[in-house]
Amino acid sequence: MYKVDFNTPCRVYFMGIGGISMSGLAEILLQAGFTVAGSDIKESDITAVLKSLGATINIGQVASNITEDIDLVVYTAAISKDNEEFLEVQKRNIPMLTRAELLGQIMNNYKYGIAISGTHGKTTTTSMMSHVLLKADTDPTISIGGMLDVIGGNIRVGNSDYFVTEACEYTNSYHSFNPYISIILNVDEDHLDFFSGIDEIVESFKTFAEILPDDGLLVINGDMEHKAKIVSELKCNIITFGLETSNDYSATDITFDEQGHPTYTLVVKGEKQDIVSLHSTGIHNVVNSLSVIAVADFLKLDREAVKAGLFDCTSAKRRFEHKGVTSNGVIVVDDYAHHPTEITATLNAAKNTPHDEIWCVFQPHTYTRTYALLDDFAKALSTCDHVILADIYAAREKDTGMVSSKDLEKRINEMGGNAEHIGDFLSIEKFVEKNCKKNDLLITMGAGNVDLIGDSLLKK
């Protein structure tokens, strides 16, 4: 594997530089004195920022973009092997690294590399950790899979030993990381277009945990059934967290304010220690915050700064994000939930906020996920007052006819729910305008572009 010499900056080309994670790595290298260029299929706010920082941006991915002066090419799994640029790079024998491999090498430059993993909650927990590290004046470098207001984007380049990033299990990319501290929030069945099932997913997280050095730390959800297998052969420090009192870090006396924000008593090894208040909604974020406190204690950060950081942390973009109120008094919230477990957590959080009825506009994400988890999706959504189904967001897949939103509609209604497949966004908007009433809560939900519906409704 090509090794980046951070003492001798070179010329690096990013294929897909406008992506949320690729752009962050590009910015880190720019700040470190590297010459950065790259390509994407369209211009965006992200490419505009990179250009302002000195990157050369090509719109469109053609062979002529690959020039002789490029020392290293970075690419993602989204780049197809018949991509013109990819083929030209191979033809010229230019060294290549995946996004994850570059991130792993970047992590080696930091004493305290913190990798936050789990099937759900990575972005929110990374947001919490970022707020805590900033409040504790650690001057961290941050790479997050969403836009975080406190750093004005998805990347912050600091000047200290602290680096925090999300670690996604898809395609086992996080196996290329080199953390000193890792968090495993949960392990669930997902990404079944890559993994064969839950056993392979658990094995993937086990391999990720084994990357840690002996003096490193794994913070793991002690409530999940797969914990024992993941930690069975580890030599590093291990801290557990969760709602069960048997965990090293747990919570009791949980209450919610009228916006659904929780307050709880922190319990460490059976001892009640502090009152913690959050501005992130839902009991699942109580659990997420426990993992952050555990890491902060390991790093010996000031507890008052930790509590202040957690309190300051509002949900990241598209994580139970309050978008506004429509002209006829409907409360609009947007959430990235695209897995049954996430849907359940989001709807439970919604029930702790003021509302009359809950309307969920759900856009299923990928055919393989919808097909594999159809009954689980139906069960999760059947608890909602009203469900409106958009067509499936294909993402990287093609429609082979294996499943549709009509199938999901049928299963929800068979389980006693109230679902209607409408399909296109314009028709959904018209339906919502006609049927949602003042003080109803409308949640646009999914990992595609369903948030555009709420944005459009709020402009009217």
Image: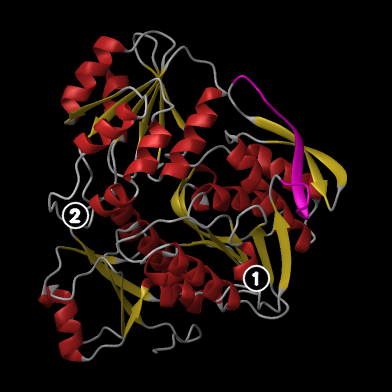
Q: Nearer the viewer, residue 133 or 396?
A: 396
Q: Nearer the viewer, mark 2 or mark 1?
A: 1
Query: Label 1: which residue?
Result: 231
In this view, 280 is above or below 288:
above
Label 2 Cα neighbours within 10 Å, binned few <14 / some 14-19 / many ≥20: few
Residue 317 sits inside the magenta stretch: no
Query: Label 2: which residue?
Result: 42
Q: Quadrant of residue 201?
A: bottom left
In this view, 45 is above or below 446:
below
* Badge 2 vs badge 1, beta-carbon distance below 8 Å: no
Render colour scheme:
secondary structure
The answer to whether one can see residue 65 in this image is: no
Q: CA distance from mark 2 to mark 1?
A: 43 Å
For the point 78% across and 55% down, the residue is 248
Q: Can you say which quadrant of the picture contains the C terminus?
A: top left
Q: Give percent across and percent down for residue 327.
A: 34, 10
Magenta stretch in the rendered image: 244-258
Q: Give percent across and percent down for residue 245.
A: 78, 47
Q: Is 330 left or right of 270, judged from the image as shown?
A: left
Q: Give percent across and percent down for residue 5.
A: 47, 87
Q: Secondary structure at mark 2?
A: loop
Q: Is 189 left or right of 456, judged from the image as shown?
A: right
Q: Tell me the amino acid under the disc marked 2.
A: Lys
